[in-house]
Image (cartoon, grey):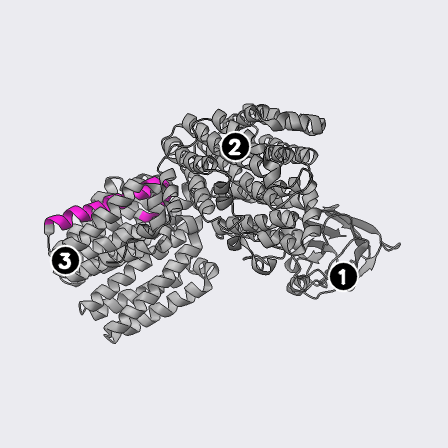
Amino acid sequence: MAPRRRDLLSASAAMLTAGLAGCSGLQGSDETAAETQSAAETTTETSASAGTATTNTAVAAEWSAYRARVWDALALGVAGEPGSGSRVVQNTFARFEGANGEYGAHEMLEATGEKNYAGFEGALGSLRSDGLAAGDLDRAREAASRADSALANAQRTIVDGATADALDLQVLGAAAQNAAMAAAVADVGAAGTVAENVRSRFEDSAAYEAVEEASGDAYERFEAALEGIVSAAQSGDVEAVRTESGNALTAALDGSYAVAAAEAGAGTGHIAALQARGWDAAALAGAGGPPTAYAHAAALTVYRARVHDSAWLAAQGATDRAATMAGDVFAHFEGARAHEALEAADGDAYEGFESGLSALRTAIEAENASDVDDALGTVDSNLVAGIGALVGENAPLLESGFFRIRVADARERYRQGETEVAASIAEDLFERFERNELDVHETVESTSEELYTRFEEEHLSGLIDAFRNGDDDAVATHYDGVQSTLSEFESAAGSATTVSGVEAGYMAGRAFDAAALDALGNDTRAEAIGQAAFQHFEAGAGGYHEALEAADESLYESFEGELEAVITATGAGEDVYPPAKQFNGEAVASMYAIVGGGGGGSHTDAASTVMHDTFAHFEEARVHEMLEDADRNAYETFEAELDAYLTALDEDGDVGAAADNFASASQYAQFALVDGVEDVPVDLQLAGGSGSSGESGHGGHGGSDLQGGPNVVEGVPEDADHVVDMTAVAYEPAELTISAGDKVAWKYAAGEAHSVTAYEDKIPEGASYWASGGFESQSAAETGWDEGKGAVQSGHSYVHTFETTGTHEYFCIPHEAAGMVGTVVVE
């Protein structure tokens, strides 16, 4: 048996697990504050003197992003989404544990003292287990405060007091944004609770007097915005909550520049606050349920089960049925909603899956057992890759469901007398778990140490031995133990929506097991499986029964009807495979119905709004020019990852991965602002500054040498009939009505370089295509922009004369995501 993975983990990882299990954190803020004051007295020994921002400042800013995430988790709990809050904590832990290197957030915190380090990890664990998971908001609030204090105390040991005050103010501004998040996911009244908490913390903080003294205007605007949030919440005005939350952040950021000893110190925290907005969007996108991509991934999990069943039948000599099953998987996939989703998420996995399926059917028909095994491995590994690409953090739940299906397969093989095959299947699952396939090992362990121990050490290991020993009683005990612990994990780590996706796949898998046993002549066992599946569903199936009925009552009835048809076929001696396929169709349809109707992705629009607002904010922010001047590479990486994040939100992409990439780009920018790029932790360095997703949009032009091209001229021509100003992220006016033959000049007014690019399918029929740079098509214009062509920069304008009447719509390539679009109506 493979060595247990947990035996190879470091001591720090063990501490992480203990924290998640609910270890105690700091004993009290007074004791910690005293320790911090002592440490702060020696700050000048470990950081630059006041007025200078150093690499330590970038690390302290990164801790601010973690502080903001702590308050995100609490806000979600206040908004009635404790499960979403728990996931935020879990993801925060995972990122913190990976933040290694000399200037990584993890190692630097440990270097400030055991009290800060252990206090932060312990408080995070308590926030999740004792607070959010237990439904105790008072304990959650206390734990969040301890986690925040541990990081705030650490910040004051490595930066000067003025910079620390500025960072405190920025964290409070980011926390005020949580009011908008709470209003989006719950009754707007929750926003008032969040704002009151921020106001209380502000009045108790050192930043309170610091900003009042440094900038009375910012102080008053921040207080007024908090009061505005409370008033808007009381009146039920969600839009006003959003507006006032934005005002609070802006005031806090403005005040931080007045408070900080060095502009770069405030700038690093400013970027961290934008990183925090990225985490807000990720939390919103995950609140209430997963996006549609989760249903796609759940459907792929069913394919994993089906191909294993086809290999089982092939091994038993049922060649024709085995080949048919493999072929049917291919046919179903070709018409499935998951088809295009997989191709878009991971083209290599898509191609590998399809080629593996073709090879599997060929090998089955040739009765070549070795080739069957190879093809099965190809199919499964590519499906694993595809599932990971589609859903990221929710993948462990689907892996758990796959484990349950395969354990059930193993028990059926055992019942057929194939004891060694059954043991091999269980061992394969053990090995998958140890190598952390789809992050299932670490997620189970971080969810509950006790659950992890029962699953792996007691039941899965015990099941392997029981199979080999032919011990029926032990098989029954450990089989039930594996199934129950995995179901407990799914309920603890997932929502009703995500668990329903797992259960739909599990039940479809069991229906195909019944069909396989029927093909092998065991009608009695096939009927028992069908009846057990029906009973499981009627008993609730982890909330799946209720979720399906609530999402689509008609589908719920047809689902039960097709399951009954499977049972009827087994009892009547009919071919079970056709009704099993029909039932599979209903099960897959239920995945999409529940995700779409049960809150899945219901807050993605709100998340997209957050990031569009962030884009617009950055384009006009003080830190924009600071970053561009400090490091062009870091600047372009930041914009590229922000653009990629918007694309993921708007096009149903992997939001979790996009949020991680944006956070990494933010940290890169934080270090760049203090001339510390060489000190960026190795695992966060983005090669070449291009970002991992830099080619997904047109946020940059691929170089610093910009060209205008035809019809981009200096100044504004005197004969221009109309002038449109191009501000940071808008055309002013955005809508213009002119006469045929009029000349329009688009004048650079503010922000980065712009383009004026017609939408090829949104100009009148017969009109010549037009765009800055003189391109003949939209695709040529977008390609040209990536090469630095078609740019309208300071002191220049783009000129075009309109001859064709009708409506012409256009956009700015680098700022389309921020809403920079316009319309010209020619009469």
**Label 1 element class:** loop
**Label 3 element class:** helix
According to the picture, the residue beneath numbered tag 3 turns out to be: 468
Q: How busy is the neighbourhood of tag 3: few (under 14 within 10 Å), some, or many (20 plus)?
A: some
Q: How busy is the neighbourhood of tag 2: few (under 14 within 10 Å), some, or many (20 plus)?
A: many
**Label 2 element class:** helix
* Circle 3: residue type: Arg
C-alpha gap between disc 1 and disc 2: 45 Å
N-term mark: 3 or 1:
3
According to the picture, the residue beneath numbered tag 2 turns out to be: 183
**Residue 570 seen in render:** no
Dominant secondary structure of the residues highlighted in magenta in the image: helix
Q: Is residue 825 left or right of residue 437?
A: right
Q: Provide residue 452's location: percent of width, then percent of height.
A: 29, 45
Q: Is residue 80 left or right of residue 789?
A: left
Q: Provide residue 413's location: percent of width, then percent of height.
A: 17, 59
**Residue 742 seen in render:** yes
Residue beneath the point at 17% across and 67% down: 316
Labels 2 and 3 touching (C-beta < 8 A): no
